[in-house]
Image (cartoon, helix red, strand yellow):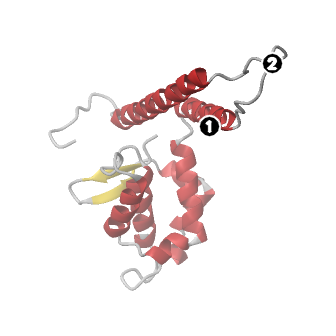
Amino acid sequence: MQIFIFDNATNTLQIDDYSILLIKEFAKLWEPERNVCKEDKKGEKRLRAFKEFTYIYLVLDFKSPYFKSPIKDRQEAALIDSGLKEKDLQDPDFAAAYQKYEELQDADPILTSIKVAYRTLYKFQVYLDNIDFSEVDIEGKPIHKAKDVLASIGEISKMRTQLQDLEAQHKTDLAAQSKLRGDVELGLYD
């Protein structure tokens, strides 16, 4: 999915796929009356929308230069870089578009599978949390052995790390995919 691209000639974010405006949450941000400001009396330049798109891109997109930073750091940097204020993030139309973009980014089938694995891992953690070491079978032997539970806990840690690595690698791969058409080749700064 490549909705936005960074134009390094103008140092601005551009819409690469205008079909995004068919989605009601993004169409709402694009409305001229919502974009009226001192610099654009009619809202035709969509200055507010581009600030909001920039914030969304910088925080959520896999191609963002902040992608590998923790979410809190991405949000703080995007707030500064987009020119938005903290109160702008509370706007319901903006919040809906932000959430929709996040859903679109995570719609990839591999990412969905990774999220299922995370949920399964969480369920296993809950299961381990509810183990009662005083439970015994009919012969009076413990049902749960501390050694086995500790081994399972170690596996959770390994699995979590593997899932995080897999997710990061897949997102990096998605970000590296290009929409070059025809015989176009990447340039020096692309």
User: From this viewpoint, is residue 157 visible?
Assistant: yes
- Where residue 123 appears, x then y in whole percent? 66, 35
Lateral position of residue 57 relative to residue 114, left or right: left
Residue lying at 72% horizontally and 33% vertically, measured from the top left? 132
**Closest to the observer: 111 or 98?**
111
Q: Give the farthest residue toward the right.
A: 138
User: From this viewpoint, is residue 179 visible?
Assistant: no
**Closest to the observer: 103 or 19?**
103
- For the C terminus, give its image quadrant: top left
Q: Tag 1 or tag 2, which sits nearer the N-term? A: 1
Amino acid at pointer 1:
Tyr
Residue lying at 51% horizontally and 73% vertically, measured from the top left? 32
Report which residue position mark 2 lands on. Answer: 137
- Give the alpha-carbon distance from disc 2 to disc 1, as whole Å: 27 Å
- Where residue 124 appears, x then y in whole percent? 64, 31
Q: Residues within 10 Å of mark 2 (few under 14, many from 20)?
A: few
Picture disc at residue 122: 1
Residue lying at 57% horizontally and 55% vertically, measured from the top left? 99
SS for callout 2: loop
**Is the residue under label 1 in contact with that under label 2 (CB below 8 Å)?**
no
- Where residue 43 appears, x then y in whole percent? 46, 76
Q: Residues within 10 Å of mark 1 (few under 14, many from 20)?
A: some
Q: Is residue 64 above or below residue 84?
A: above
Q: Is residue 169 above or below residue 41?
A: above
Q: Is residue 160 above or below residue 47?
A: above
- Between tags 2 and 1, which lies in front? 2
SS for callout 1: helix
Q: Give the farthest residue toward the front.
A: 140
Q: Give the farthest residue toward the bottom.
A: 38
Q: Is residue 18 above or below residue 85?
A: above
- Where residue 158 appears, x then y in whole percent? 46, 27
